[in-house]
Each structure stands twice: as C-alpha cells, then as structure tokens.
Amino acid sequence: MQGDTKQMKSLSQHKKLRIITINLHEPFLSALAKTGHDFYVITKYKGHDYSWNPSTHPVPSNCTLIEFNDEQKAKLKSGYFDVIICHTIKNLLYFFPYRKVPCIFVAHITLKYVTVVDWIRSLLKKLTYHVFSLTHKVKFVGISELKYKSWSINGEIIRTFPLNLPPPDSGIGYGRVIVVGNQMKRRGLECGYDLIEQVMQKIPITIIGNNPGVTAAVIPNNRREFIETFRSGRIFLFTTRFPHNDGYNLAMLEAMKMGMAVVTVDNPSSPIIHNYNGLIGKNAEEIIAHLGTLLADPQLVDELGRNAQKTVNEQFSEELFVRKWNQLLFRAVQDFNLS
C-alpha cells in the first residue's frame, strides 16, 4: 500500500488535473488558475446565470467557460473530471448526484451565531455539508482562520493572495479615497455600510462595484476601467467589523499590494498595524479623522503604503497558496483512488 501511494504521488505531481467548478468568485478562480490545471467553469445551470464578469478579472487561459448540460453531466459520471470544487452549500446540492469524483468545499463565508436566525442558518449549512460528506469524498478548506473556525469542520486553511495590479501613477491620487464592494447597502453591517454612510457625510469617497441606491458608486464596464478607477486613489477604506467577517478582503489586499494606505476598523484578524501599514479607527469619528490626516499628508500615505506592500507580500504569498492548493488537489485524488 505504501508503495502504491508513492507511485501515485509521483504520477500525480506530473499530471495536469481536470477540475470542474461553478463561477461565483472570479478573483478566487483567477488565483486558483495559478496552480496550472485545466478548469472547467460553469456559467449556466438550469436557468441560473453565473456569467464571468470581465470587469473583475479576465478569464485565465486555462479556464474554459461551460454550461452544465447533459454533455458535462455525462463526463462527470464517466470520471472525465478529476476534482469538483464547490464554493457554496447550493453547489454541493448541484453536484450531489455525482459520487465518482472527489470534491473540495471552499468556505468563503463566515458562519454567524449572533441571532436565532443566524444559528438556524449556520446549523443547516453545516448539516448539509455533513450529509454530503457521508456519501461523497469531500475535503474542507477555509480561506481564512475566522471562516475555518466558524464552520468547526476538520480541514485546512489556505489564505488567498492578491493578484498584481499596476500601482497608482506617480504624484497623483493622494486626494481620493477608494472603497471596493458590491451590494454594500443591502449587506449593511456585514460590510460596515453604516460607517461608510457616516464617512460620506464628511469626506467624498469613490465606491467601486454594483451598489444600487449609492450615489458614490461607480460600476466599471470592463477590467481596464476597474483597474484605472481603483488605482486613481492612494487611500483605501475597509470597514468590516468583527464578528461579521475578516479584517480584510481580496480588494484590500490588492490595495496593499499596490502600495495604498489603508484606513480600517479594529478587527482581530486585520493585517493592519496602526501607524505602521495603515490607520485603525474604533468608530466613524476616528475613521474620518484618520482619512483627514492622510488627505493632508502625502508623505505619510507613501510610508504606510510601502509597509502595506511588505506586509501583504509576507503574509499572503502566491507561492504558498499555489503549493498548498496543489498538495490538496493531488491528495484529494489520491485518497479517492485509494478508498
């Protein structure tokens, strides 16, 4: 058995896997594509539209956009695909009929236990996962420590990393505050929109994303417009508080990678250290004061931005992400074949 495992490992390391998944997180799938495997990304299924949004990320060359039709279902049943990657509980239900393929479930959301409704929803999601795990070979991965712990399921943590974006042009953008997010008004406390509303009364900000009812919002038509709008400012505002979610998201990591100065709220999982790589405020008044300080001090913006770049390169490594995901993918295939 040990010899078989070694032989399979040796073969797997030289194999390009065929992976089927559903498009729900273009930035995350773009990061996954760095593993070098062939990804088949479902964009249509039973009237559900999961079209790839070109303003977020271009489709990587090793990602093929597909419709989940009878042809793809037949391939799943025949074992054509090596791995299924699911991003939501609904994804698990889509793939429930297919047991001949190992599955990886990615926890993109934090389960909450604040209200009775939170408890019920969270427990139902965990129950669905456990039922799926009784009949399918599935591995669990959380994209952050907070998300992993909230699910309380054995697996591993693989932090995502920001893709490289061109930095802001020299000498400009010091007077502009950027926020990135979708449906922020509807999501409310989850993304700290109550704080953003208070900030907007004192300081002009630009919100990039699909945000109905928000006059400060800009919806880019394509990837080029998204990047140009993003890099038009040098100050990034992030307002998600604990326990609603992590103290960072991919957009904030991208801002740090570009060398932007971050203003954020107190959150135990935030990579921001006050006065080193950003500024932290406990409430809207402190956030407004910090933004005012940065708007008046371009030199401080540059200093915080340089340290932010250093932090994100050290703590959110592309090399580590790719290595750990490849290990997980090959292990999923090996464990399935050995069972």
Image (tube, grey):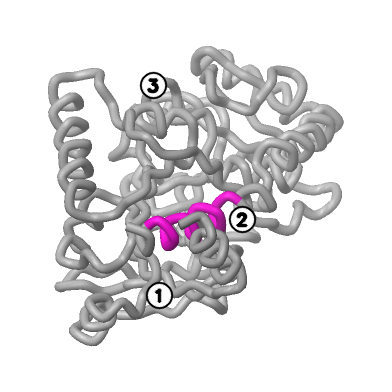
Give the mark, 1 or 2, whose residue is nearer the N terminus: 1
**Residue that numbered label 1 is attached to:** 40
What amino acid type should be assigned to the residue bearing mark 2?
Answer: Val
Residue at the spot 52% in from the left edge and 28% down from the top edge: 247
Q: Residue 243 carries which label?
A: 3
Residue 293 position within the rendered picture, expressed as x and y whole percent measured from the top left? 72, 22
Q: Quadrant of the C terminus?
A: bottom left
Residue at the spot 71% in from the left edge and 34% down from the top edge: 261
Residue 252 position within the rendered picture, expressed as x and y whole percent measured from the top left? 59, 40
Choose between 60 and 222: the one closer to the eye: 60
Choose between 201 and 335: the one closer to the eye: 335
Q: Is residue 57 visible?
A: no
Residue 140 position within the rendered picture, expressed as x and y whole percent measured from the top left? 37, 44
What amino acid type should be assigned to the residue bearing mark 1?
Answer: Tyr
Magenta run includes residue 185: no
Tell me the element at label 2: helix
Magenta run includes residue 330: yes
Residue at the spot 34% in from the left edge and 53% down from the top edge: 87
**Residue that numbered label 2 is attached to:** 322
Q: Is residue 217 above or below residue 238?
A: below
Give the magenta part as a residue range.
324-335
Q: Is residue 233 above or below residue 55?
A: above
Give the mark, 2 or 3, whose residue is nearer the N terminus: 3
What amino acid type should be assigned to the residue bearing mark 3?
Answer: Pro
| Location of residue 279 (image quadrant) | top right
